[in-house]
Image (cartoon, grey):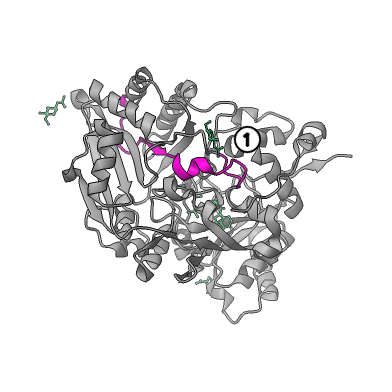
Amino acid sequence: MRVTKSVPVVSYISFLALYFSFYTITPISSNSIQDDFIKCLHRNTHVDFPLEKTFFTPERNASIFVEILESTAQNQRFLTKSLPKPILIFKPVHVSHVQASIICSKKLGMGLRVRSGGHDFEGMSYVSQMETSFVLLDLSKMRQIKVDIEDNSAWVQAGATLGELYYRIAKKSNRHGFPAGLCSTVGIGGYITGGGYGSLVRKYGLSADNVLDAKIVDANGKLLDRSSMGENLFWAIRGGGGASFGVILAWKIKLVPVPETVTVFTVTKTREQDADFKILSKWQHVVDKLVEELFIRVAIRPIGNGGNKTVMTSYRGLFLGGQGTLMKVMNKGFPELRLTRKDCTEMSWIESTVYNAEFPANTPIEVLIQVKSPFGKLSFKSKSDFVKEPIPVSGLKRIFKKMMQEDSPASFLGWTPYGGKMAKISESEIPFPHRNDTIFIILYNTDTETEPSKHINWLRDLYSFMTPYVSSNPRQSYVNYRDLDLGKNEENSKVNFKKAQVWGTKYFKDNFERLVMVKSKVDPENFFRHEQSIPILHVQS
Ligand SMILES: Cc1cc2nc3c(=O)[nH]c(=O)nc-3n(C[C@H](O)[C@H](O)[C@H](O)COP(=O)(O)OP(=O)(O)OC[C@H]3O[C@@H](n4cnc5c(N)ncnc54)[C@H](O)[C@@H]3O)c2cc1C
Ligand SMILES: *[C@@H]1O[C@H](CO)[C@@H](O)[C@H](O)[C@H]1NC(C)=O
Ligand SMILES: *[C@@H]1O[C@H](CO)[C@@H](O)[C@H](O)[C@H]1NC(C)=O
Ligand SMILES: *[C@@H]1O[C@H](CO)[C@@H](O)[C@H](O)[C@H]1NC(C)=O
C-alpha cells in the first residue's frame, strides 16, 4: 500500500476566515433549460449513439420517467410526491456522454446528481433539496465488468452491482473473490467512494483498500486515471464519500484469494436470558481478536407481540475454511455460543455471498445478476456508531429494553466486527479512519414505512441513549451510512463550514482537512455538491 503525504492544513482551517458556498440558484423555466441541455449534449458528444434514447423528461416521457427514477431508488422514504424531482434523467452509455453532461450542467447552472446503485441512505443520488433544477445522471447502463484472473484484478464500471461483480469473478475462478458488502444490489460506484465493508473485512480490509486504479471525470469534464489525477485525488476518492470530486466511471480492483470451501452459520437466541447477555458480552470481547478468517456479525431485533414480545439476537458467521477447523476455532475462542456442526453449512465462496445477502437457502447464484434484493424496496432511516470498549452487561440489558419499545421487526441493530486487517491499516492511509481501535460498527435501522416520525424519534432517542457506550470526541460515523442529522444543530451557524466540520470530523476524523484541500484544488467552483459534499475553502483576503 502506498503512503501518501498528508497536507498540513490545520492552520488554514483555524486561522483564516472561511466561507463556503453551497447554493447556485438560477430559476429558469424548466422546459427551455431541458432543451438547452439536450442541445448542449449534442454539441459535446461525438459518438455514434442516438442521444434520444438516453434521456427522459417528466413532460415528454411521462409514462416511463417515474419508473426509471424509482428503478434503483432504494429508500422509499425519498420517493414521496412532495420531494423535488430531477428535471431530466440522463442514462449515458459512453464516457463522452458523462463528460458532456458535466460540461452542460455547469454551463447552464444546473445541479447534477450521480447515481450508481441508488442505495444512498438519504437518497442523495436522486433527490436534492438545495437545487432549483437538477439532472440525474444514472449510470445503470455503464455496468461492464472485465475480470483478469492472470493479473488478479478487474475493471468494474460504476453502474455494476456488488452481486454482479461477485458472479463475474466466480464464473472465471472459484479461488478468487473481492472483499465487499453483504447486500448484493449495492452499486460499486457509490459503495467504494465511502470505503465499503463486508464479510471479508477482517481478512482483507475495505473494498477501498483494494483499489488499484480508477477512471473519473472531473469538474471540467476531463477523463482522468490514477496517474493523471495524481495521488491526492486518488486518495480522496477512496473513502472520502460520493459525488464530491467527480464522477467515477470505473474502479480497477485487486482480487483476493478465497478457499474452495467456506463455512457459514446462523445461531439465533430469543429467550433474552442472562446466558444470552453473557454470549453477547463475550462476543464483544473476542470478535475483533479471533482469527482473521472468521467473521461473526450480530443482528438484534424486536420480535413477537403482546406478552410474547422479545428481542432476537442472530449470530451470522462466515469462516474461510471447512467446518472442522471452524469448530476448533470456536471451541477455543468463543465456546459460549455453543456452535454445533448442525448449525454449519459448507459451500463455495460465491454461494456464501448469496447466503450473506440473506436470500433463502438454496437460491441459485444467478440471483446475483438479477439485481434483486431479498427485502424488496425499503423505507428506512439509519445511523451509525463505532464501539471501542465492550458495552457492559448492564448496558446491554438497557439496549434490549429500548429495542422492546419498537414494534417493527424490520427495525434492527447490526453489529459488525472489525479487527484483523482493519487494525493494521493506518487512519490516514485512505480517508476512512475507523481502524485500529474499533471493535465493531453499529448500524441502527428503523422502518419508516408507517408512522415515520414515531420510528425516527425512537431511533434518535436510542442513538442519544448510546452516547456513553460508543466513540467520542468525535463520535464517529460511517459516511456510507449517510446521516443528515449530523451537524444539524449547527444549522444557524453563519459560517456553514462549521456545520460541515461537524459531520466531516465524524466521518473522516483528521482526514477531513486533507479532503477539503483536495476538493478546493480539483473543484474550486464546487460543481459537485450535495447536502454533505466536501466543502471548499473560500479564503477572504
Ligand atoms: C440494503 C443496503 C445494504 C448495504 N450494505 C452495506 C454493506 O454491507 N457494507 C457497506 O459498507 N455499506 C453498505 N450499504 C451502504 C452503501 O455502501 C452506501 O449506501 C453506498 O453509498 C451505496 O452506493 P450506491 O452506488 O448503491 O448508491 P448511490 O445512491 O447511487 O450513491 C451513493 C452516493 O455516492 C454518489 N455516487 C454514486 N455513484 C457515483 C459515481 N459513479 N461517482 C461519484 N459519486 C457517485 C451518489 O451521488 C451518492 O452521493 C448498504 C446500503 C443499503 C441500502
Ligand atoms: C422521450 O421523449 C422524446 C420526445 O417525445 C423522444 O424523442 C425520446 O425518444 C423519448 N426518450 C426515450 C428514451 O424514450
Ligand atoms: C404467545 O404465544 C403462544 C404460542 O404461540 C400463544 O398461545 C399465546 O396466545 C401468545 N400470547 C400472547 C400474549 O400473544
Ligand atoms: C493498534 O493499537 C495497539 C494497541 O493500542 C497498538 O499496540 C498497535 O501498535 C496499533 N497498531 C497500529 C497499526 O496502529
Residue 455 shows up from this direction = yes
- Left or right: residue 427 versus residue 28 is left
What type is the residue that disc 1 sits on?
Thr
Residue 25 shows up from this direction = no
Q: Position of residue 202 (x, y in %)?
A: 43, 45
- Left or right: residue 359 versus residue 421 is left
Image height of 367 relative to 424, above or below: below
Considering every residue shown, the one lying at the far top of the view is 394
Q: Position of residue 302 (x, y in %)?
A: 29, 31
Q: Magenta region, mostly helix, strand or loop? A: loop
Tell me which residue sits at (59%, 29%) in the image: 474
Q: Which residue is mark 1?
A: 505
Image height of 234 relative to 481, above or below: below
Magenta residues span 404-433
Q: Nearer the viewer, residue 421 or 156?
A: 421
- Left or right: residue 127 versus residue 233 is left
Q: Is mark 1 within 8 Å of ligand 1?
A: no
- Element assignment for label 1: helix
Q: Residues within 10 Å of mark 1 (few under 14, many from 20)?
A: some
**Quarter holding residue 486:** top right
Q: Position of residue 402 (x, y in %)?
A: 36, 23
